[in-house]
Structures are given as C-alpha cells and as structure tokens.
Image (cartoon, rainbow, N blue to C red):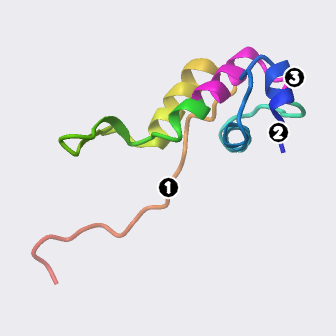
C-alpha cells in the first residue's frame, strides 16, 4: 500500500488521506495496464506519471458529476466516460509510454428487418 509519506516524498500529494492513498494506488494499477512504464517505486516515476496520479486522485471521486445544486436538487454530468478522460490525460502526459490502441472483439452485426 502506498503511504502518505511516499506520495509526499515523490512530490505527488502533500498530506494525503487514506482514501487518496488508495486512489493513487488504483492510479498506479491503471498505469501498469495502460502504459509501458516499468513501475518499481512511486519516487522513480517520470514527472508525467506523477502528474497523472495527482490528476487521477482528483478525477475519480467525482468522475460523473460536474455541478451540483442542493436547493434545486439538480446535477450536471459529464458526457465523456472516465476511461476516455483518463486515456486523454495519459496520452497528453505520457505520450511515449501510453498504449493508445485497444482492440475489442467484433460483436454480432445488427440486421434490420430480417429474420
């Protein structure tokens, strides 16, 4: 588990809470899957990866809601998925490490009006 001291020493987050430490660890897992980075310690990450983790900690908790009103009980939501936002962030901060192409298996095609 990543500790607040490790995040502070790496220059990612100062005075991180337990939840922020867990989010940073989840961000590291995301980087392991979606980049070619060889991750050994948080302190050894390139600057772009450290910036990604800091942004990951901010983005994930409120990934869908962009605005909220208590009195009127209304919310505004992002139209982009969290995965797309993270991919764009990683592509901009880690262009040399990001695995940009993802392949999905072909689904059965729709056939309109035929049985």
Outermost residue, left side = 113
Q: Position of residue 35 (x, y in %)?
A: 69, 35
- Residue at which label 1 appears: 104
Identify the residue at horizontal 90%, vertical 34% (top origin): 40
Going from the N terminus, do you reach mark 1 or mark 3 first? 3
Tell me where the magenta segment starts and ends, as one range: 42-55
Secondary structure mainly formed by the magenta segment: helix
Give the quadrant of residue 74.
top left
Residue 44: mark:
3
Going from the N terminus, do you reach mark 1 or mark 2 first? 2
Residue 2: mark:
2
* Marks 1, 3: nearer the viewer: 3
Q: For this rendering, which residue is in front, 66 or 51? A: 66
In magenta stretch: residue 37: no
Q: Position of residue 25 (x, y in %)?
A: 74, 41
Looking at the rendered image, the quarter that the N terminus falls into is: top right
Identify the residue at horizontal 55%, vertical 30% (top origin): 58
Query: Circle 3 sits in a helix, a strand or a loop, which is it?
Result: loop
Outermost residue, front side = 71
Query: Circle 2 sits in a helix, a strand or a loop, which is it?
Result: loop
């Amino acid at each position: 588990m990543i500790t607040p001291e490790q995040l502070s020493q790496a220059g990612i987050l100062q005075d991180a809470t337990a939840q922020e430490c867990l989010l940073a660890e989840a961000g590291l897992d995301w980087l392991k899957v979606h980049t070619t980075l060889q991750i050994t310690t948080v302190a050894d990450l390139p600057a772009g990866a450290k910036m990604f983790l800091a942004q990951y900690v901010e983005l994930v908790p409120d990934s869908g809601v962009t605005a909220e009103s208590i009195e009127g009980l209304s919310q505004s939501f992002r139209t982009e998925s969290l995965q797309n936002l993270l991919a764009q962030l990683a592509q901009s901060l880690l262009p040399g490490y990001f695995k940009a192409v993802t392949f999905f298996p072909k689904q059965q095609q729709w056939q309109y009006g035929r049985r």
